[in-house]
Amino acid sequence: MMKSAATATIAALLFDVAVTSAECSVDLDWPNLSCMSMSFEKSMWYDTYHGMLSAVGFTELSTTPFNNTSLGKDISADDWYVLEPHEDAEMKVDKYSAGDKEHVKYIAFGENVTVSMAAPKSDIVLTGNETFDELMDYLNDGGSGLLLLLKNKSTLTVRAKNDSSISYTAGPDPGTRWIAVGFRTAINVTLSNPQSNGIAIENVWDGEYGGPDWLGNFYYPRNALPVVAYAGEKYATAGRTCSNPFGVYQAAVSTRTGDTPETCIGYKFKGTVAEELMTKQPTLSPTPSPTSEATRGQWGTLSLLLATTAAFFLF
């Protein structure tokens, strides 16, 4: 079935207003109101009347074998139980390095692994907007990057406060997610899975760092940014990006691969220029001070376009 114009608009890549250089010195949060901004604890709920238990995007919707009626409680009673979230995941990491494929390892929830990849040999030029299948074509054609299998193992338990025998646990949903990551250059990255529905990629750039590009000498190089795609149709994406003239670039991108909340997945990237390459500090240009909400929105959009967002599209 064809998407409506409204759905096509939703599917467009949306970004928050630009983040200032000062804010870029700390880790970016997920975009406001995006599906990734909902933590496990914020997503979990229990309906005591119907006995429905869920943490959307983390655990399956389940019906418990007990509820207020079966326990002889008032139909509106909501103070007799506790919720016990357990967020967990593991990630399989396979790397593609200039045509060579290698299984790296499985990493547990919160762990990390460093992966080194050679310069790609593929004739395919990445634009930054590739689908999962297109990224896999690139990797199988001699490209460099990663194929990740993120397995959600989270559970949510509801338990009566005064009777541990009254307990039920909901299992993970969704179970597995495939993620493809492509790079345009030889690179070393550190991967982790800090959330059961999200990954983190970090790089300290110590490679070629020649004369000024359009962003200037002291910005993280555009050719080292990752291209990330997920198996399934991209339904809606929201992101935040920032860069500063001290060698830092960050992105936090939240994506839904369907029209339901449990399809939410995201990645964060943080790239920094190695300290030895920062031989001198640049001179900062003055920043206009917005005087109204309209002006602030216009300046944020312009700053994002010129200082960060273009990095996603102009390769």
Image (cartoon, rainbow, N blue to C red):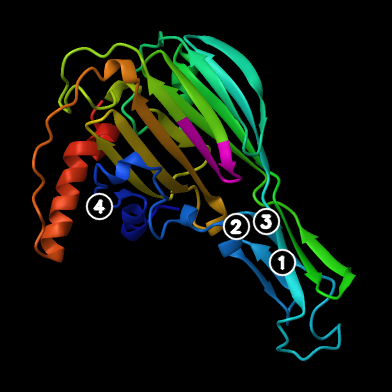
Q: Nearer the viewer, mark 3 or mark 1?
A: 1
Q: Residue at x 26, y 32 (%)?
A: 311
Pointer 3 or 2: first along the chain: 2
Q: Position of residue 34 (x, y in %)?
A: 42, 56
Kindly identify the amino acid type of the residue bearing the numbered disc 4. Answer: Val
Pointer 3 or 4: first along the chain: 4
Question: Which residue position is annotated with label 3?
Answer: 59
Kindly identify the amino acid type of the residue bearing the numbered disc 1. Answer: Leu
Magenta span: chief secondary structure:
strand
Q: In what element is the residue under mark 3?
A: strand
Pointer 2 or 1: first along the chain: 2
Q: CA distance from mark 3 to mark 1?
A: 13 Å
Question: Which residue position is annotated with label 1?
Answer: 83
Pointer 2 or 4: first along the chain: 4
Question: Which residue position is annotated with label 2?
Answer: 40
> Where 237 falls versus 119 (above or below)?
below
User: In the rendered image, is residue 288 in sight?
Assistant: yes
Kindly identify the amino acid type of the residue bearing the numbered disc 3. Answer: Thr
Residue stretch rendered in magenta on the structure: 193-201
User: In the rendered image, is residue 133 in sight?
Assistant: no
Does 102 appear in magenta? no
